[in-house]
Amino acid sequence: MIRHSNNTSESWKNLNWKKFRKDLFRLQCRVFKAIRAGDKRKAMSLQKLILKSKAARFLAIRQVSQLNAGKKTAGIDGKKSLKFEERFELSDLLKVSSNNWVHQKLRSIPIPKKDGTTRMLKIPT
């Protein structure tokens, strides 16, 4: 990967996207197998590994900034689209902040059913 060149657009385009997809898919398969085997500790450690993985970071940034239909829609920061340099900066920011990430709790909302009972709808916050 050519990180320190003047032409960051070429270095972004020349990343090995096929290898990134392959690596992330292998990690996701390992998580699936660990959960199917009932090994929660291994599944959690593999999920942490996915959070820290360079392939997952770059693929997530590419999905949000290039491939999504809403790529021109402004986010909460007010930016509509990212330049190539900003994509690399975002990758570095995500790398630093992945160590202290904690899952937020789900918000529970009771939904009444026809028979008079309620069921809980869990919404990610």
Image: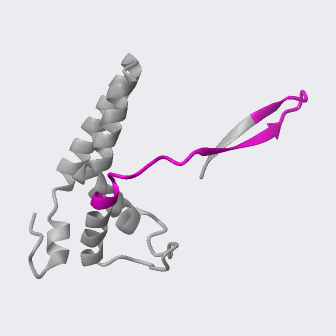
What span is colored magenta in the figure? 95-119
Q: Tell me what residue is drawn at x 24 percent, y 70 percent.
A: 88
Along the viewing direction, whichever of 15 and 111 lies nearer the viewer: 111
Q: Percent x, y for residue 3? A: 12, 70
Q: Tell me what residue is drawn at x 28 percent, y 49 percent.
A: 52
Magenta stretch containing residue 60, yes or no?
Answer: no
Q: Is 125 above or below relative to 116?
A: below
Q: Is residue 39 left or right of residue 111?
A: left
Extreme-front residue of the structure: 100
Q: Is residue 105 left or right of residue 30?
A: right
Q: Is 16 above or below relative to 83?
A: above
Magenta stretch containing residue 112, yes or no?
Answer: yes
- Image quarter for residue 93? bottom left
Extreme-top residue of the structure: 37
Q: Is 41 above or below relative to 15?
A: above
Q: Tell me what residue is drawn at x 84 percent, y 33 percent.
A: 113
Q: Percent x, y for residue 94? A: 32, 61
